[in-house]
Each structure stands twice: as structure tokens, then as C-alpha cells.
Image (cartoon, rainbow, N blue to C red):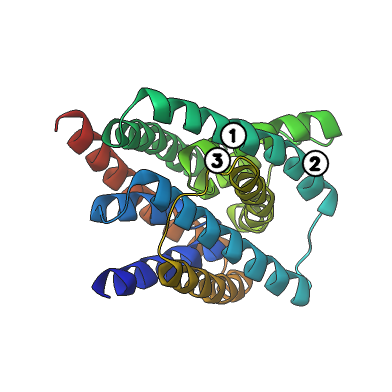
Amino acid sequence: MIFRLIYAAVIFCATFFGAFVGLGGGVIIKPLLDLIGHDPIQVVNFISTCAVFSMSISSTVKHIKAKTPIRYNIIVFLSIGAVAGGILGSKLFDCLLTLFDNTMLKSIQGLILGLLLVASVVYINVKNAKSFKIEKPVPIILVGLALGFIASFLGVGGGPINVAFLVLFFSMTVKEAAVYSVGTIFFSQLSKLVTLAVSHTIPKFDVITLVIAILCACIGGIVGAKMNKKANEKIIQTIFTVIVACVALVNFYNAGAGFFA
């Protein structure tokens, strides 16, 4: 019971900030559940994927009802690439799972994610950083492919990495990128769930824990989306930086603990 309560608290907070500043949620859920160490990596990835997918639905619906300005063509093309990337990322994860044990693969994921998070924080906080404004379908799809691959392989939803990519390639503000990040996450996580179902690789999990995770994620997504609508750009960027920096440290700790165990 205590682990279910801990999971509920972690997932609610993660998905709240995921929808609020575009973190996705999985980037917080995955390393913290790894740190707790109650479930194997396959179960943690699955719970994280389901929670982030649920958050993306509730958050996106909230934005649509609030009439948040959204360029749907960007989300559509990003999502086409994200679906393909999500499938490739899931396949790579399954392949590596046959080559490395649970601890080593968790450490590899933690190290890669930590480095990507540091890069995201640095880029977001560089004044007048170089950015582009991609508008053609093929380049947008390629960006989505990269995002979907990273998100699926690392099992995190890809939130802060999505935000950095969106700011870089589409010249968005962090607040705008948060909305598009969540929309893209929906499709990348959907593709991963479909891949797991089709390949019959869904791990054995506790049903009650999963239901709690989904409910907390939906509530977190709704509340986070509401806060995103109200907050200004500076607040969102500051919260994004602090949380991502903390999560990067957790990932480096998880990686080090695994490599030197």
C-alpha cells in the first residue's frame, strides 16, 4: 500500500508539472520510480508510458476547451514522425534488454537522459540562442521522428527534450512549446503502447497501481494545463529550469549507482 501511495504522489506531481511547463511527466516519473526500485525496468517503463499518455489526453482536451491557440499542422506532422520514432525506440529498447541486465540498461538510460536534460536546460536559458522556423512537412516529420525515438527508448515521454527541440526548430517560447510538447507526447506514447500490445510484450503489473497511476495522471494533466494558461513565460521557464536540473541530477545518480554497483 505504501508504494501505491508513493507512486500516486510521484505521478500526480510529475504530470502536473508535465502539463504545466511541458515536461511530459515521464521524465520525472521514470527516474524517481527507478530510484525507489520497487519494480523492474519493464514495469516502470510501462507505468510511466500509461501515465504520460493519460496526462497528454486530459491536458490536450483542457487546452482545446480553453481555446488555446494551436497550429495543428505542426502537431500532425510532428506526430507522424513521433509515431514512427516511437516504434523504433521501443524496438531498440527491447533489443538492448536482451544484451544488458536490468541494472545496466537502467544506468545507460539514466546517463543518456541526464546529458540530454542538461543540454535542454542550457539551451533554454541562453539569451538570443540560435533558432529556426521550420514550416515544411518533411523537416517537421524528421524532428518528430527524433523526438519519438528518444521518448520511447528512454521511456520518459520526452517532455523537456521536446520543449528544447520546439524552441530550437520552431522559434517558440517555452510556454508555447509546452502545449505542442504534450500534443506530440500523446502520439509517441500511443505508438509505444500499440507496439507493446501487438508484440505481446506488456509486462506483468499490478492492476490497482496502474489504475491509480492513470487517475493521478489525468488529474495532474488537467490542473497543469489550467496553470499553463494562467502563468507567464518567465515563471514557466524558471520552473522548467529548476525541475529539469533536479531530475538530471537524479538520473546521473541512478546511472552512477548502476555502473559502480
Mark 3 sits on what residue?
152
- Which residue is painted at 33% across and 47% down in the image? 40
Mark 2 sits on what residue?
77
Camera-side residue of 129 and 209: 209
> Which amino acid lies under the numbered mark 1 shown in the image of this protein?
Phe
How many angstroms separate mark 3 from mark 1 (CA)?
5 Å
Q: Which mark's residue is nearer the viewer, 2 or 1?
A: 1
First of labels 2, 1 by sequence position? 2
Camera-side residue of 13 and 34: 34
When the figure is inspected, residue 223 is found, relative to residue 41, above or below; the finding is below
When the figure is inspected, residue 22 is found, relative to residue 10, above or below; the finding is above
- Which residue is painted at 69% across and 74% down in the image? 62
First of labels 3, 2 by sequence position? 2
Mark 1 sits on what residue?
149
Quadrant in which the N terminus is drawn: bottom left
**Number of dots carrying numbers:** 3
Badge 2 density bin: few <14, some 14–19, many ≥20, Cα 10 Å: many
Q: Position of residue 55 (x, y in %)?
A: 58, 65
- Which residue is painted at 66% across and 65% down in the image? 57
When the figure is inspected, residue 105 is found, relative to residue 29, above or below; the finding is above
How many angstroms separate mark 3 from mark 2 (CA)?
18 Å
Residue farthest to the top?
A: 99
Q: Are marks 3 and 2 in contact (CB under 8 Å)?
A: no
Q: Position of residue 202 (x, y in %)?
A: 52, 49
How many angstroms separate mark 2 from mark 1 (CA)?
15 Å
Q: Is residue 14 left or right of residue 163?
A: left
Q: Is residue 91 left or right of residue 78?
A: left
SS under mark 1:
helix
